[in-house]
Image (tube, grey):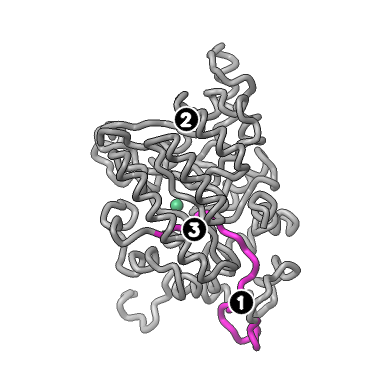
Amino acid sequence: MKESGRKNPITRRGFLELASATLATAGLAANANAETAAPGPQSASPATDPIPAAPHGKIALEEHFTLAEIIEDSYAVKDLPPETRSRILDLGAGRLADMDRGGLELCIISLTAPGIQSVPDTSRAVALARRANDHLAQNIAKNPHRLKGFAALPMQDPQAAAQELTRCVRELGFLGALVNGFSQVGTADSAVFYDLPQYRPFWATVQDLDVPFYLHPRLPLETRLQAYEGHPWLAGSPWGFAVETSIHALRLMGSGLFDEFPRLQIILGHLGEAIPHGIWRVDNRIRRSHLTLKAKRPLAAYLRENFYITTSGNFRTQALTDVLLEIGADRVLYSVDYPYEDVVEAQIWLDHCPISDADRIKIAHLNARKLLRL
Ligand code: MN
């Protein structure tokens, strides 16, 4: 049969929206979060509303924006369709409408990758972080019950990063930081990771402020892409992001950072960047091969006590089950990865994946409320 002969081809998104409508009509979609539904304009006739208009109380922590001045710098944005470009700039009505569509009561907004981290000139990085954070704060002030912020940080200068985080938390009301992987410092061909000794005073500030630090992916440097040669699709979000970010997170664990600052809390997206799946083998091989690390404990201990993991861009029950088995339901947080992922697809998945409703509600918002003190 010819595909072109169809009058109304069903797209993936259309299918999900239809499914959402059917489930909502059957009273199923609202069930998971019914007891904790956020106050707000309730739909007059939920039975006929294809997508519930009111927020359903979910909190999402990996939702991005960018500034018009750097939108061309972001590899994450420049190859995407025009509607994604306009979505990522929108911190007003368009974003709130998408949040309503996806049952999101509150989003913690952050600067998209690579953001500040790809600016080798330290003074430019410091100024850009400040502009991004001020712009975000001004927009949050217009909808303070729907939007909150994670600070962009000029990690090129650890002291400036600590000062900017302190300003963002104390003066702008931000809830923590989101940093896009290693920073280029001084020269474009440099990659500085935050387990290095010069970052210890920065981490002391993060622990003192008692806010989480979201370690978000970025692309490996162009000069260090040998493993991906001939396969550019592999270097980014399909796989390379998880490689880059998991190495960084394991470096933090292995460096003894969490022995020195045991109250630090790091957030990883994408159901843990493959670390939960691999952590037993990491510890097992360290032990059996008698490898020497600065860390005092098995790395799985830090994963369970110093990390939270979000569902951003990984709406897969098998992978979630693995995370639940490794670190437990108290450390899993909902996220979408807007505007790169679909708010409705994420919502339908979490609302209907076969886990207990007690765990579902923890993931949807209770854990975030506790961590972020909301
Ligand atoms: Mn993201």
Could you tell me residue 157's position as x and y percent? Answer: 39, 35
Q: Is residue 273 left or right of residue 69?
A: right
Check if residue 267 falls in the magenta segment: no
Q: CA distance from mark 3 to mark 1?
A: 20 Å
Residue 335 visible somewhere in the drawing: no
Amino acid at dot 2: Tyr
Could you tell me residue 88's position as x and y percent? Answer: 39, 63
Q: CA distance from mark 1 to mark 2?
A: 43 Å
Could you tell me residue 126's position as x and y percent? Answer: 36, 44
| Residue visible at 48% across and 61% down in the picture | 137
Q: Residues within 10 Å of mark 1 (few under 14, many from 20)?
A: many
User: Secondary structure under badge 2?
Assistant: helix
Residue 204 quadrant: top right
The tag earlier along the polypeptide, 2 or 3, is 3
The N terminus: image quadrant: bottom left
Asked if labels 3 and 2 touch by Cβ distance under 8 angstroms, the answer is: no
Residue linked to disc 3: 109
| Residue visible at 58% across and 64% down in the picture | 106
The tag earlier along the polypeptide, 3 or 1, is 1
| Residue visible at 72% across and 67% down in the picture | 36
Amino acid at dot 1: Ala
Amino acid at dot 3: Ile
The C terminus: image quadrant: bottom right
Q: Is 147 above or below relative to 54? A: above
Per the picture, the main secondary structure of the magenta-coloured stretch is loop
Asked if labels 1 and 3 touch by Cβ distance under 8 angstroms, the answer is: no
User: Secondary structure under badge 1?
Assistant: loop
Residue linked to disc 1: 54
Segment tinted magenta in the rendering: 42-65
Residue linked to disc 2: 199
Check if residue 48 falls in the magenta segment: yes
Residue 282: numbered disc: none
